[in-house]
Image (spheres, rainbow, N blue to C red):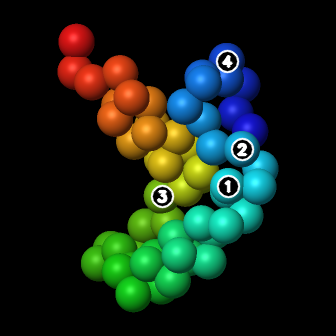
Amino acid sequence: MSGRPAHPSDLSDDACELIQPVVTAWKAKHPSVSGHEGQYEMREVVNAILYRARTGCQ
């Protein structure tokens, strides 16, 4: 995990294991046109989406 503090909306290790095949399959079907692999782990991207969904846009 990254060096940031954990949020209540973060994925647990068990939940991450469950969604990993889905995220991996999605990434395989949607490669970057430029070949860029991305700077962030997909777990952190999902954590950010869950945080935003939980807190809304202040």
Residue at horizontal 46 percent and vertical 76 percent from the top: 27
Q: In the drawing, does residue 10 fall left or right of residue 36?
A: right
Query: Residue 13 placed where, x, y %?
Result: 77, 50
Tag 1: amino acid: Ala
The disc, 2 or 4, on the residue closer to the chain's N-terminal end is 4
Q: In the drawing, does residue 39 fall left or right of residue 16?
A: left
Query: If the image is split into quadrants, where does the C terminus sit?
Result: top left
> Dot 4: what SS?
loop
> Dot 2: what SS?
loop
Tag 4: amino acid: Pro
Q: What label does residue 38 carry, if any?
A: 3
Residue at horizontal 35 percent and vertical 21 percent from the top: 55
Q: Give the answer, above or below, for where 19 lies relative to 8.
A: below
Q: What label does residue 12 carry, if any?
A: 2
Discs 2, 4 touching: Cβ within 8 Å = no
Question: Which one is in front in this view, the residue at disc 2 or the one at disc 3?
Answer: 2
> Dot 1: what SS?
helix
Q: Work out whether residue 1 or residue 14 is closer to the camera in this orientation and state it.
A: 14
Query: Residue 3 placed where, x, y %?
Result: 72, 25
Q: Give the answer, above or below, for where 41 lies relative to 36.
A: above
Discs 1, 2 touching: Cβ within 8 Å = yes
Can you identify the residue that label 4 sits on? 5
Tag 3: amino acid: Gly
Residue 51 visible in image: yes
Question: Which one is in front in this view, the residue at disc 2 or the one at disc 4?
Answer: 2
Quadrant in the picture for residue 26: bottom left
Tag 2: amino acid: Ser
Q: Give the answer, above or below, for where 53 lies relative to 18.
A: above
